[in-house]
Amino acid sequence: MDRRQQRRAGGTVAAMGILLGLGTGATGCSSSGAAAEDVKGGGDPVSTLHRAADALREAGTSKAGTSMEMATGGTRVTIRGRGVYDYRHRLGRLTVVLPEDPAGTSEHRPITELLAPGALYLKNRGAGVPADKWVRVDTATLSDGNLVTGGATDPYAAAEVLRGTREATFVGRTEVGGTAVRHYRGTADLTRAARYAAPGTRESLAAAAKGFATARVPFDAYLDDEGRLRKLRQRFSFVNGHQKATVAVASTMLLYDFGIPADVRLPAPGDIYAGRIAGDDSAGGAGNRPEH
């Protein structure tokens, strides 16, 4: 890869938002055969998807794997995360791994993210932040509501997006990780999702509805027989604040091992970094500055 391609790849990572650069700035339908099977097991597709977040709250906790892919300017970048989530308290902990450099080695330490209603905490944020400090970001100030910024979509927020489902079809039965699931395909509306989401998530989704290039979110959702999400792939579209180009992002999460212990503790006030982050002046936007 030549220097121009390396610069393009580096810009792609920044555009993905892991460095917080994004702060600037119904009835279902289905084929007759599939519908008949779905009515027996899962009911109306739209209503079933509206209840997906509630099913996760009832499940309590799970492990989570995330993958975020972005393609722009001929470059494709994938950021991966893994951790646990407590749906009743809406708290999660993920370890997010940035892409390798062109030589095949990682230039960045994994970033630890804590997810909470209305807030995102990051450790190993870099850019002059002390190694023992966290950066706190108010997700309602982010133009994407933190559906993209952290490099991993908050699992509960992703489920809340499905409250905005306007149309959906039952595709059929399949398996995810050895578990029998029902596959649904549809489109959600972020404005509608924000209207019915829980406080904390509501404000973030409202920001995303305004900040994304479109409030429509195409998705593929895979639910088990208890209505719990096992896999969810959502496609977002935002405008790169630096290049003014529309960028497509595909966010995929896998949820498994429901009911496992998930003790997520947020940082103490003294552990949150209160200084400026290097590069903020060039990036701009409230989302690039920690709260004091």
Image (cartoon, rainbow, N blue to C red):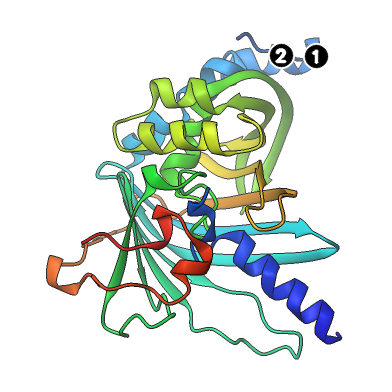
| Viewer-nearest residue: 172 or 124 | 124
Can you identify the residue that label 2 sits on? 35
Tell me the residue at 37%/34% (across/down): 203
Q: Quadrant of residue 238?
A: top right
**Residue 129 place in picture, x, y as percent:** 34, 80
Mark 1 crowdedness (10 Å alpha carbons): few <14, some 14-19, many ≥20: few
Tell me the residue at 69%/84% (across/down): 101
Can you identify the residue that label 1 sits on? 31
| Viewer-nearest residue: 70 or 279 | 279
In this picture, is 73 found above or below 277? above
Q: Residue furthest front?
A: 281
**Residue 59 place in picture, x, y as percent:** 35, 40
CA distance separating discs 2 and 1 = 6 Å
| Viewer-nearest residue: 128 or 66 | 128
Say whether marks 2 and 1 touch (CB < 8 Å). yes
Amino acid type of the residue tagged 1 in the rendering:
Ser
Tell me the residue at 66%/37% (across/down): 213
**Residue 95 place in picture, x, y as percent:** 44, 70
